[in-house]
Image (spheres, rainbow, N blue to C red):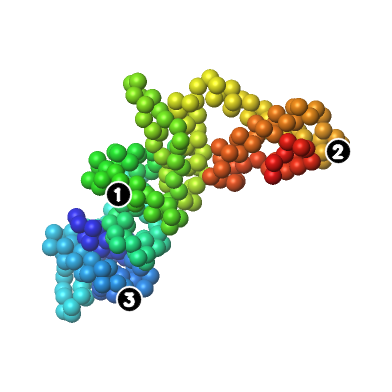
Amino acid sequence: MTDDGFLVYLALRQIIRQDIKRYYVSLGYLIFTLTGSQSSTRLITNSNINGMEELIENNTIIKKTNDKQYEWVCDLSKLSFKTDKISKKFYSVVNGNYISKILNTTYKERIPLVRFYCYIMSTVMKSGETRGVGFTSYTNMADITGICRQTISKYMDKLASLEIIYIYKSSDNISIDGNIREISNTYGDIKDKDKIIQVGVNHELQFGVNSNSKNKANAKKTRSASAKLNIIKKDLKTTGEIRYEYDELKEIYDTLVIYNKRYSHDEGLQKDLSIFSNYDFYKG
C-alpha cells in the first residue's frame, strides 16, 4: 500500500462504526477527518484522491456507486476488525489529533511522516511495566520499514519537536558478545514522558557499560544523599536545626548536583538544593 492509500485508510478507519457497512464518503469528508478542515493543500487533496482510487482498485474497499466526482458510497466492511480478547488480534492505537497536527505542518514529507508515526506506535510495548514504551533501534526500524537510518532519525526528531512523541536519548553504551554499541533510545507517546525516562534510565543502570560497580556505588551514594536531604528538610521544619556538620552537608550537596546534571533533560526529576543557599559551596 502506498502512503496515499495508507492515508485514506486512516481516514476511513476513523469514519467506520460497528455493524455499519455502507458509507457515503466525499473528498471533503476525508480531508476534514484527517486535518480538521474542509480545505487543504493540493498535496493532501491529491493524496486523498489517489489513495481512494488505490483502495477501490485493490478491493480494500468496495465502491457501490459514484454518481458525482469525488463522492462515493462504499462498503467498508473489509476495514473492520475485532478488538476483543477472544479474537487475539494485536492492534495499535494512534491519535487522530496527532495525525491532524502532522498534516497541518509545512513539512514536505508530512504524509510519509504520518505513516511513520503509525509505525512507531506499533513498536511500543502493549502490556506490562513498560507498556507505552518502545525500544526498537533506528537500525532495526530501517530494516523493517525500508527507510534509511538517517531519515528515521530525522522523522523521530520531527515527531518529538511536534510534541507527539518523547525520546529519551541514552549517552551510555551496551556490550553484546564483546561488541560495544549505543544503547537504543526509549520513546513513546509524549503523555508517557515520565515512564519513558524512567525506563530509559533503569535500562542504562542495568545494562550500560558504565553501569559497573563504581556506578552502583554512585547510585548508593545518591540514594543516601537524597535520604539525608529529606532528613534536613524535616529537621528544619520541626526543630530548626540541622544534625549534619559542614563537610557532610557539602558532600550531600555535591552528590546531588551531579545527580541533577544527569537529569538536566527533566526538571521534574531534579532535587531542589536551595536549602543550601546560605553555605559558601552553594552555586545557584
Mark closest to the chain's N terminus, 1 or 3:
3
Q: Position of residue 242 (x, y in %)?
A: 82, 33
Above or below residue 171? Residue 22 is below
User: In the rendered structure, are the residues bearing label 2 and label 3 in contact, judged by CB atoms less than 8 Å apart?
Assistant: no
Structural crowding at the residue carrying mark 2, measured as other residues with C-alpha within 10 Å and reported as few (<14), some (14–19) or many (≥20): few
Numbered disc 1: secondary structure:
helix
Q: Position of residue 141 (x, y in %)?
A: 29, 42
Label 2 sits on what residue type? Answer: Gly
How far apart are labels 2 and 3 at the CA level? 65 Å
State the count of labels: 3
Residue at 40% across, 28% down:
174
Q: Say which element carries label 3.
A: loop
Secondary element type, mark 2? loop
Label 3, residues with CA under 10 Å away: few <14, some 14-19, many ≥20: few
Dividing the picture into quadrants, the one containing residue 214 is top right
Q: Name the mark on residue 240.
A: 2
**Which one is in front, 282 or 143?**
282
Residue 83 in sight from this viewpoint? no
Q: Position of residue 10 (x, y in %)?
A: 29, 60
Amino acid type of the residue tagged 1 in the rendering: Thr
